[in-house]
Image: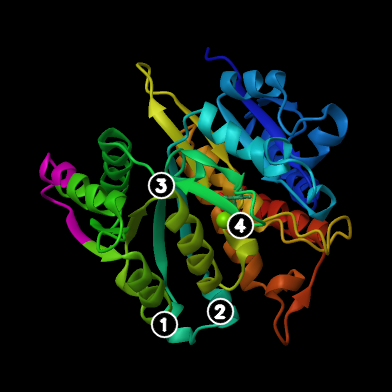
């Protein structure tokens, strides 16, 4: 008998708790219907943790996150904490989790559900059937590089520094993750950097090329500058299969790719570490959307990105492929039936609340399981 699967839920701020509640509904359903039980602990991260403890991630919460099989995170941040010093800000807690858990590979799939193709700001034919996977490096680059800081030059001027830094092994491991994932898709990888301007870009291109030569002959590798990639994403997004890129370009390009799908409220993500000897990876799953403070607490949020993040958790942390497929299928069917939260609302569709959307997903799972 294997021990129960251990999950840590960190709902966070803004709409985080309400979208997480809908994942709890899906988990309850699985518990009752599939007899799959999880040991679930819940804790604070982000602004709510700052309010309670004066820091956005306590050492205890971090230790718990390191010990469980997977972390589910809602979202962090909001205007309430705009003036908090940087290392205590809500975002700092999230960055610390990523860094300390060494979650270097951030998988951000951008897929267009058929029912939502018309919700995209691009023409339907450009996005229908779209299925891109962005693999963003998550623990290096300018997010963590030193030196950094703002210095007072004393003459009424200040000087701010951020450092973009990458090592061979950091680039190699995320490229390998991208090549391995591409094998289960269309076997095409576009490596994205600014080798025309940046030293890190030159090294990135060199290492991507070497890693590719080391056993990935079945994968087609292209290189593209990040500015061109942004342009190509809105010109002809279906040319891409897997995109692998650094932390900052990945942040920007994944928001862009997300919007192709009709709404940020639809996009899940998985952040994975290296496999240990038993094959187990540290992992965190979170929607790509933020805390949406303008609609928080009003039962208006779209819980689908959070629910789809949980599906990624089933797939990548627990190898529960059938269950992951079922959750994703339920989401697709609910959309086919015309149910929409405000962010994806279109004429002729039925506007529903966050809770009603969650209920509709489990009702659909009833049908799929029955
Ligand atoms: C993301 C977010 C974060 C990031 C913020 C909240 C620190 O934008 O996950 O894409 O920049 O990585
Ligand atoms: Mg972002």
Residue appearing at x 69%, y 38% in the figure: 27
Q: Which mark's residue is nearer the viewer, 4 or 2?
A: 2
Cβ–Cβ under 8 Å for marks 1 and 2: yes
Using the numbered discs, state the Cα–Cα distance from disc 3 to disc 4 in whole angstroms.
Answer: 42 Å
- Disc 1 residue crowd, few under 14, some 14–19, many 20+, Cα 10 Å: some
Q: Is residue 123 left or right of residue 244?
A: right
Q: Earlier in the sequence, mark 3 or mark 1?
A: 1
Q: Residue furthest top?
A: 1
Cβ–Cβ under 8 Å for marks 3 and 1: no
Residue appearing at x 73%, y 80% in the figure: 349
335 over 310 or under it: above or below: below
Q: Magenta segment, which residues?
A: 210-222
Which residue lies under the disc numbered 4?
Answer: 330
Q: Earlier in the sequence, mark 3 or mark 4?
A: 3
Q: Is residue 350 left or right of residue 285?
A: right
Using the numbered discs, state the Cα–Cα distance from disc 3 to disc 1 in whole angstroms.
Answer: 34 Å
Using the numbered discs, state the Cα–Cα distance from disc 4 to disc 2 in whole angstroms.
Answer: 21 Å
Q: Quadrant of residue 288?
A: bottom right
Which residue lies under the disc numbered 2?
Answer: 120
Q: Quadrant of residue 177?
A: top left
Which residue lies under the disc numbered 3?
Answer: 164
Q: Secondary structure at mark 4?
A: helix
Q: Earlier in the sequence, mark 1 or mark 2?
A: 2
Q: Earlier in the sequence, mark 2 or mark 3?
A: 2
| Disc 4 residue lies near ligand 1 with CB under 8 A | no
Front one among 32 and 127 = 127
Front one among 200 and 342 = 200
Residue 74's x, y, as percent?
69, 45
Residue appearing at x 27%, y 65% in the figure: 224
Check residue 221 for magenta coloring.
yes
Which residue lies under the disc numbered 1?
Answer: 126
């Amino acid at each position: 008998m294997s021990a129960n699967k251990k999950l840590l839920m960190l709902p966070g701020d803004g709409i985080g708790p309400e979208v997480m509640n809908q994942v709890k509904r899906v988990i309850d359903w699985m518990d009752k219907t599939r007899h799959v039980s999880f040991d679930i602990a819940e804790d604070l991260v982000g602004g709510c943790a700052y309010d309670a403890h004066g820091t956005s991630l306590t050492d205890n919460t971090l230790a718990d996150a390191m010990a469980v099989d997977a972390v589910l995170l809602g979202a962090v941040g909001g205007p309430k904490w705009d003036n908090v010093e940087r290392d205590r800000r809500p975002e700092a807690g999230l960055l610390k989790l990523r860094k300390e858990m060494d979650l270097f590979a951030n998988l951000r799939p951008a897929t267009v559900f058929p029912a939502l193709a018309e919700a995209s700001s691009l023409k339907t034919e450009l996005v229908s059937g779209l299925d891109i996977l962005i693999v963003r490096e998550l623990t290096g680059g300018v997010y963590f590089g030193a030196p950094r800081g703002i210095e007072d030059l004393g003459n009424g001027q200040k000087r701010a520094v951020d450092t973009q830094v990458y090592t061979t092994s950091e680039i190699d491991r995320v490229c390998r993750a991208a090549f391995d994932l591409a094998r289960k898709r269309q076997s095409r990888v576009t490596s994205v950097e600014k080798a025309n301007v940046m030293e890190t870009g030159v090294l990135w291109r060199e290492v991507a090329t070497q890693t590719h030569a080391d056993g990935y002959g079945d994968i087609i590798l292209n290189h593209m500058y990040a500015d061109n990639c942004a342009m190509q994403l809105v010109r002809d997004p279906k040319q891409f299969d897997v995109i692998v890129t650094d932390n900052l370009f990945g942040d920007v390009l994944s928001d862009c790719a997300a919007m192709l799908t009709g709404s940020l409220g639809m996009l899940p993500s998985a952040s994975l570490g290296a496999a240990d000897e038993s094959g187990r990876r540290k992992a965190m799953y979170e929607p790509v959307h933020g805390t949406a403070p303008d609609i928080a607490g009003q039962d208006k949020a779209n819980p689908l990105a959070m629910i789809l993040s949980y599906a990624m958790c089933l797939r990548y942390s627990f190898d529960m492929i059938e269950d992951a497929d079922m959750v994703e299928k339920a989401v697709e069917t609910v959309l086919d039936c015309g149910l929409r939260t405000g962010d994806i609302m279109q004429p002729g569709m039925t506007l529903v609340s966050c809770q009603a959307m969650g209920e509709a997903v489990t009702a659909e799972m009833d049908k799929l399981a029955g």
